[in-house]
Image (cartoon, rainbow, N blue to C red):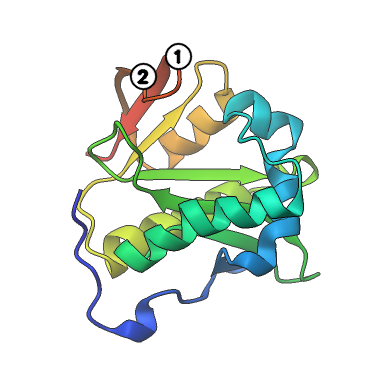
């Protein structure tokens, strides 16, 4: 999974916009928001408990998981901000996951912002970032068998179900989707 890193350094760690959203690379300044997001009931149910219980835990997670991937690949996890109110509402990104050969697109939202089309809007932009800006030729997505909203969104993004997978340190069998 060696993506073509963009030669233009201004492209790296950029802010991106859609009609209603601003996406910016997650940073230590986002620790309180990431703590809230990662402890939401749907995040824990469908993505998993990441063990974030304090701002310090969130800062460590960002420092160990998200920032190194941006430094290595130029892309990663983006905080999603609603333009109209400036509120952080979710996160979407492209992740290099252990156990997957193809970079994985993922997304999560605070519950009160689910079902409003933000997921498709943000995920479409993130897919474009990976493929158009960083030259990824394929993207994957994984989700639990009972996360029907994510399955629907992944399908709208043009990814097709390929198989069931289990990733390291997770016993759950996940649905694996990939671009054509």
Task: From the top left corner, tell me how far across and down residue 159 is, in percent.
Answer: 34, 37
Taking depth in this image into account, of 69 and 15 the one nearest to the observer is 69
User: Residue 76, position in %: x, y?
Assistant: 43, 58
Relative height, residue 60 to residue 72 (above, below): above
In this rendering, position of residue 107 left or right of residue 72 = right
Q: Secondary structure at mark 1?
A: loop
Determine if residue 24 is in view.
yes
User: Do residues under tags 2 and 1 come within 8 Å of each other at their CB atoms?
Assistant: yes
At x 59% / y 54%, what residue is drawn? 60
Vertical relation: 125 (above or below) 43: below
Which residue in the structure is indicated by mark 1?
171
Q: Tell me if I can see residue 20 in this picture.
A: no
Q: Judge the density around disc 1: few (<14), some (14-19), many (≥20) Cα neighbours within 10 Å.
A: few
Residue 178 location in percent, x, y? 29, 35
The residue positioned 22% from the left and 80% from the top of the image is 7
Height in image: 13 above or below 33?
Answer: below
Image label count:
2
Residue 111: image quadrant is: top right
Front position in the image: 155 or 82: 82
Q: Which mark is residue 166?
A: 2
Image coordinates of residue 169 in percent, x first then y, are: 43, 23
- Which quadrant: the C terminus? top left
Circle 2 packing at 10 Å, graded few (<14), some (14-19), many (20+), is: some
Q: Earlier in the sequence, mark 2 or mark 1?
A: 2
Instruction: Give the CA separation, mark 2 to mark 1.
Output: 7 Å
Mark 2 lies on a secondary structure that is loop
Q: Quadrant of residue 124?
A: bottom left
């Amino acid at each position: 999974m060696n993506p073509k890193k963009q030669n233009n350094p201004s492209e790296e760690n950029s802010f991106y916009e859609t009609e209603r959203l601003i996406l910016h690379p997650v940073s230590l300044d986002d620790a309180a928001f990431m703590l809230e997001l990662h402890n939401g009931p749907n995040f824990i149910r469908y993505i998993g408990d990441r063990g974030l219980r304090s701002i310090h835990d969130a800062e460590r997670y960002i420092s160990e998981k998200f920032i190194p991937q941006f430094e290595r690949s130029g892309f990663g996890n983006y905080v999603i901000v609603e333009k109209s109110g400036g509120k952080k509402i979710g996160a979407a990104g492209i992740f290099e996951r252990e156990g997957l050969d193809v970079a994985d697109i993922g997304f999560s939202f605070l519950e009160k912002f689910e079902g409003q089309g933000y997921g498709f809007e943000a995920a479409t932009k993130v897919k474009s970032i990976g493929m158009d800006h960083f030259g990824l030729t394929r993207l994957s997505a994984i989700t639990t068998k009972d996360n029907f909203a994510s399955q629907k969104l992944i399908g709208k993004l043009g990814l097709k179900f390929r198989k069931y997978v289990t990733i390291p340190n997770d016993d759950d069998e996940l649905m694996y989707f990939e671009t054509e």
